[in-house]
Amino acid sequence: MKGLIGKKVGMTQVFNEEGNVVPVTVIDITSCEVIGHRTMEKDQYTAVILGFKDAKEKHLTKPMAGSFKKAGVKAKRVIREFRVEAAELANFKIGEAVNAGSLFKKGELVDVTGITKGRGYQGVVKRWGFRGFGQTHGTHEYRKHPGAIGQRKTPGRVYPNKKLPGHYGVEQVTTQNLTVADVLADKNLVLIKGGVAGHNEGLVVIKPAVKSAMRAAHKSGKK
């Protein structure tokens, strides 16, 4: 299995082998546990179900509480599935904690998914990167306006998905091809080189880099 659920702790910096400072994002996976399996006989595919952060019973629906009780595991707030081969399924026992060191190695490329910070209602300059109007002496309160949005007589309406002011942030974003700077297996911490979407204490999902795997498969196929 290649996939983890973690919590973004924050950013810090480490020194690499050359002595250069590298900015890293610290991701904590301490409460990530295996809470179930998907089998070919029952579900027509094989996967490992991971849970993250303990949940209070009052926050669960009765079906959810019943499923956790039947599996014999603690209730979790966040649940994700990660596909695995049928032969690997037995390696992940239900109720066991996931160890970061057994899944990712230093120098490996990964894709990290998180929810971006909320920035409220913003204009077109901050939200979409518009250039804005020329700031000459004659410009009066028109420096950050979006400009005309009409389509004249035909079609006589504003097209859908027009870039306009609105709510900015709180979107799921995946940052691809990030490097694992280090894995602190004893502390269950993964250090990712560079920034990751989301605020501190936010939920993130780490997976192997899709594009690098596709490139490797393409090269091996050519040979």
Image (tube, rainbow, N blue to C red):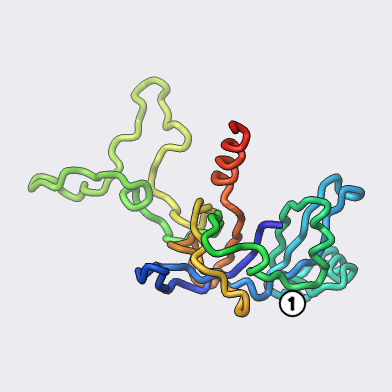
Q: Nearer the viewer, residue 19 or 32?
A: 19
- Residue at the spot 62% in from the left edge and 33% down from the top edge: 221
| Image quadrant containing the C terminus | top right
**Residue 134 placement (x, y as % from top left):** 16, 43
Mark 1 residue crowding within 10 angstroms, few (<14) / some (14–19) / many (20+): few
Furthest residue to the bottom?
186
Against 81, residue 214 (above or below) is above
Disc 1 target residue:
56
Classify residue 159 as left or right of residue 96.
Answer: left
| Image quadrant containing the N terminus | bottom right
Furthest residue to the front?
223
Q: Which type of secondary structure does the marked residue at label 1 adopt?
A: loop
Classify residue 128 as left or right of residue 63.
Answer: left
**Residue 147 placement (x, y as % from top left):** 28, 39
- Residue at the spot 48% in from the left edge and 60% down from the top edge: 197
- Residue at the spot 37% in from the left edge and 54% down from the top edge: 122
- Residue at the spot 59% in from the left edge and 31% down from the top edge: 222
Q: Nearer the viewer, residue 59 or 215?
A: 215
**Residue 123 placement (x, y as % from top left):** 34, 51
Furthest residue to the left?
137
Q: Nearer the viewer, residue 100 or 67?
A: 100
Q: Nearer the viewer, residue 19 or 189?
A: 19
**Quarter occupied by residue 154:** top left
- Check disc 1 and give the amino acid type: Lys
